[in-house]
Image (tube, rainbow, N blue to C red):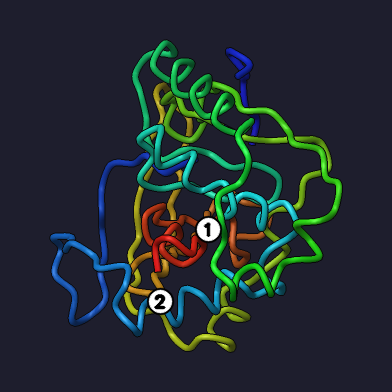
């Protein structure tokens, strides 16, 4: 997917048309409590699963509070980039938010929870380039978003939904979303599978080279923050 960079200074899903939900779920979203025992347990397992995440993702989790400070309630994690969940019609607000996140990334990392630190101590000590936070047009729906990326980044490893189901069971909820861009481009049809009470959503796209693969993972920023940082536990 081609991304046009508009201003140097990093995810998500914009779309129109929720189509299908699984049995037992109403169409209206409910407020999540990220500290409920079951959610934290499964969310923590997923965030620590190195069959899913690359080294750059671990550093992303450790800076998730910077995204929250800038008003991002969700982020979209691709193999090589992260896109903010907030979408704007014009580039100006995206540039401002990108600048705020870029500046916040310069601060020392906050104290991580003991379990998360133990799981990823070696990765966090590696010297990995920091990448860039930018304002970009999100080509799927033509909105303006904040994006983090760097050449050679590995955030999300090659993954299928079947592998996720083998590890964590069937999704708690599944839905299909149609995302329409401006103009005559064919809309993307996304299949979204939720885990950890919706804090993690594995997304497949019919526009991806392999529609059966996980194209991106959407993370609830507040829920991830509660798992990653000691002060939130």
Q: Quarter of the image containing the C terminus?
A: bottom left
Dividing the picture into quadrants, the one containing residue 86 is top left
**Residue at left offset 52%, top offset 54%:** 205
Q: Residues within 10 Å of mark 2 (few under 14, many from 20)?
A: many
**Residue at left offset 74%, top offset 60%:** 54
What x and y, as percent, mark residue 35?
32, 72
Q: Where is 128 relative to 117, above or below? A: above
What x and y, as percent, mark residue 142?
44, 25
Q: Is residue 216 left or right of residue 157?
A: left
Query: Viewer-proximal residue, 15 or 102?
Result: 102
What x and y, as percent, mark residue 10?
57, 32
Q: Which residue position is annotated with label 1?
A: 217
Q: Where is 134 relative to 85, above or below? A: above
Q: Is residue 43 left or right of residue 166?
A: left
Query: Viewer-proximal residue, 202 or 45?
Result: 45
Query: Viewer-proximal residue, 112 or 189?
Result: 112
Q: Residues within 10 Å of mark 1 (few under 14, many from 20)?
A: many
Q: Secondary structure at mark 2?
A: helix
Q: Is residue 88 left or right of residue 104?
A: left
Q: Give the numbered dot on residue 40.
A: 2
Q: Secondary structure at mark 1?
A: strand
**Residue at left offset 57%, top offset 24%:** 103
Q: Are marks 1 and 2 in contact (CB under 8 Å)?
A: no
Query: Viewer-proximal residue, 12 or 34?
Result: 34
Q: Give the numbered dot on residue 58.
A: none
């Amino acid at each position: 997917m081609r991304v046009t960079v508009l201003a140097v200074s990093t995810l998500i899903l914009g779309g129109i048309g929720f189509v299908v939900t699984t049995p037992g779920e109403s169409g209206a979203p409910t407020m999540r409590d990220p500290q409920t025992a079951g959610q934290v347990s499964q969310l923590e397992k997923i965030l620590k699963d190195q069959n899913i995440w690359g080294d750059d993702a671990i550093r992303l989790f450790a800076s998730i509070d910077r995204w929250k400070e800038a008003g991002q309630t969700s982020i979209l994690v691709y193999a090589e980039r992260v896109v903010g969940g907030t979408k704007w019609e014009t580039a100006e607000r995206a540039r401002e938010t990108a600048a705020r996140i870029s500046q916040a990334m310069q601060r020392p990392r906050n104290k991580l929870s003991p379990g998360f630190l133990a799981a990823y101590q070696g990765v966090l000590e590696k010297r990995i380039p920091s990448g860039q936070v930018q304002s970009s047009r999100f080509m799927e729906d033509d909105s303006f978003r904040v994006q983090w990326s760097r050449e050679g980044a590995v955030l999300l490893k090659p993954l299928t939904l079947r592998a996720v189901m083998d590890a964590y069971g069937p999704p708690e909820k599944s839905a299909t979303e149609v995302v329409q861009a401006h103009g005559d481009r064919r809309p993307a049809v996304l299949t979204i599978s939720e885990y950890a009470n919706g804090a993690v959503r594995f997304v497949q796209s019919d526009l991806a080279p392999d529609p059966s693969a996980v194209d991106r993972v959407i993370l609830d920023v507040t829920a991830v923050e509660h798992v990653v940082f000691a002060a939130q536990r």
